[in-house]
Image (spheres, helix red, strand yellow):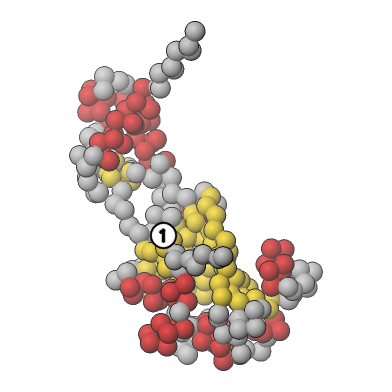
Amino acid sequence: MSTPTKEPPPSRRIADALRQAIERGEYSAGDKLPSERVLAATYESARNTAREAISILEAEGLLDVWHGKGAFVRPPARMIRLGANRYSHRLRIETGLSPFRAEAQRAGKTAHVEVPDIRRVKPPADVAERLGVPASRRSVVQRVNHYFADGEPVQIGVTYIPWVIAGGTVLATDATDPQSRFNSIYGEFEQLGHRLTKVREEITARMPRPDEVAMLRIPPGVPVIQVLHTGVDQDDQPFEITRFTMRADLNGLDYWLPIED
């Protein structure tokens, strides 16, 4: 004897119906959904049930809910983060831009980077392991970067550089942004004898922490993409690690990868 299928609660049924309407294009990006009163009447439910359905879709990242104004379909906004091409030596020479600035320009956006903190620190264990430096000593320079596109925060990047490379150089001291000579970190690395020839990027996703929500202005229901990036030089030695935390609604990943034999 088969077990009867359990009916979803009324709020879930309303949320499912609205989601399907959005997917069919009945509501476009930026459109306002009917009020809670109208939804309650349409689906023959209580207003608090309709309110819960809106909250479900907000938590899924489909809606922006503004107090006193209503619920609106969230527009898709995506700035693609390229793979190998974003670190191209030729691209950097041709444009004179850092990887982030180059990809923002390609997306038709104006880039801005802030560096609120540079200091010598003990590295996290995973960073120490990848760089081959001691975790028990202040063996790296840590550079905290906040990335903006058209004035909107899109990424946090925390870069770790071995002290034996960065100590006494602009990498350990320069936090200027707009058009200083420190416009591309990889240009500085090349000056120090470390040309980027290989990249490893370990990609995960999770929900954001409260400090990340505040810094990146992340709406409810939006996860973050985390990329642990390792730069490797011409001698096959890792020389920098950056932990990128990116708003998943404003960033994408696009990689062409060679297939090993």
Residue beneath disc 1 = 252
**228 over 142 or under it: above or below:** above
Q: Nearer the viewer, residue 147 or 19?
A: 19
Most extreme residue toward the left is: 26
Which of the 4 image quadrants contains residue 6? top left
- Dot 1: within a 10 Å radius of its alpha carbon, few (fewer than 14), some, or many (20 or more) residues? some
In percent of width and height, residue 69 lies at 26, 43
The residue that appears at 51% across and 87% down in the rendered structure is 187
94, above or below 134, in the image = below
| Side of 92 relative to 234 (left or right) | left
Which residue is located at x 71 percent, y 69 percent? Answer: 128
Looking at the rendered structure, the secondary structure element under dot 1 is: strand
Position in image of residue 71 (x %, y %) = 29, 41
Q: Residue at x 31, y 36 (%)?
A: 19
In front here: 257 or 13? Answer: 257
Amino acid type of the residue tagged 1 in the rendering: Gly
Left or right, residue 227 beside residue 178:
right
**View extreme (top): residue:** 1
Quadrant hosting residue 164: bottom right
Q: Is residue 172 visible?
A: no
Q: Residue at x 22, y 35 (%)?
A: 34
Q: Position of residue 53 (x, y in %)?
A: 35, 31
Q: Is residue 131 visible?
A: yes
Counting from the top left corner in percent of width and height, residue 5 is at 43, 17
Q: Quadrant of the C terminus?
A: bottom right
Tell whether 207 sits left or right of 126: left
